Amino acid sequence: MVYWMLKGREFANCNCEYGCNCQFGGLPDKGHCQAAFGFAIDEGRHGNTDLSGLNIAAVFRWPGPIHEGQGECAAFVDERATEAQRNALLTIMTGGDTAPMATVFAVFASTITTMHEPSFVPVDFDVDVEGRKGRLRISGHLEMDGEPIRSPVDGSEIRAQIRLPNGFEYEVAEVGSGASRAIAPMQLDHASSYGQFAYLHLDSHGVVRG
């Protein structure tokens, strides 16, 4: 197994209400799950291949709860990546070179039945974790926007966090509001739903803690 490590900032948006039951071992509140994901890699490597400064993204859909499988996924890799970097990132994103079920990539990959051909495209992505703001644009494929949840009473920002000390994706996530529209090769459209902003530090063995 080739050792890898990724450290960076994530913004993800699914169709659940704010909070997302899946984060607490529950079932999706719409009965099914669809989501978009963006990750800015601030530091990273796969063996001797440097992955720092690259962006990745994905779109997912499951007909029921994630753990029941039958999922569909489309992956997007920064066009700036070299062939070695592309291969490394796709290996990581599909659960390769990873201890069994140790990361969110490995867990999700185990539930996917339909995996579209990856796209190597410009991934315009910016995220402010503490500010609960994010913007992802992949021309012709995907748009995702995130902002803080706002009070229905006076419009003020509401800040909430989820802490998962033993999670397989993050230890702390900021919760916000997200909207996503995917065009190709998958289609989805939802708004004012669960937005997740987090610092990720993952390696071949799981979440790097402390």
Image (tube, helix red, strand yellow):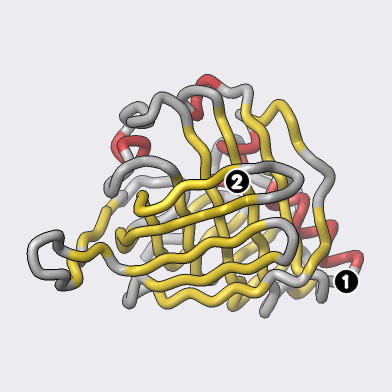
Question: Which residue is rendered at x = 91% and y = 65% of the image?
Answer: 83
Q: Quick check: 99 left or right of 185? A: left
Give the alpha-carbon distance from disc 2 to disc 1, as whole Å. 21 Å
Which amino acid type corresponds to the residue marked 1 in the rendered image?
Thr
Q: Position of residue 120 (x, y in %)?
A: 83, 62
Question: Which residue is situated farthest in the right direction here?
Answer: 83
> Which element is circle 1 on?
loop
Q: Position of residue 125 (x, y in %)?
A: 60, 73
Q: Quick check: 43 left or right of 198? A: right
Question: Which residue is rendered at x = 55% and y = 55% of the image?
Answer: 37
Say which of 88 and 203 sits in front: 88
Residue beneath disc 2: 105
Q: Quick check: 83 left or right of 135? A: right
Say which of 163 and 26 sits in front: 26
Question: Which residue is rendered at x = 39% and y = 46% of the image?
Answer: 167
Q: Which numbered disc, 2 or 1, marks the residue that appears first in the sequence?
A: 1
Question: Which residue is rendered at x = 41% and y = 64% of the image?
Answer: 198
Say which of 40 and 72 sits in front: 72
Q: Quadrant of the C terminus?
A: bottom left
Q: Residues within 10 Å of mark 2 (few under 14, many from 20)?
A: many
Say which of 161 and 191 sits in front: 191
Question: Which residue is situated farthest in the left direction here?
Answer: 153
Residue beneath disc 1: 82
Task: Tell me if residue 101 comes above or below residue 14 in the rendering.
Answer: above
Q: Residues within 10 Å of mark 1 (few under 14, many from 20)?
A: few
Label of residue 189 in the image = none
Q: Position of residue 34 (x, y in %)?
A: 52, 39
Q: Quick check: 184 left or right of 41? A: right
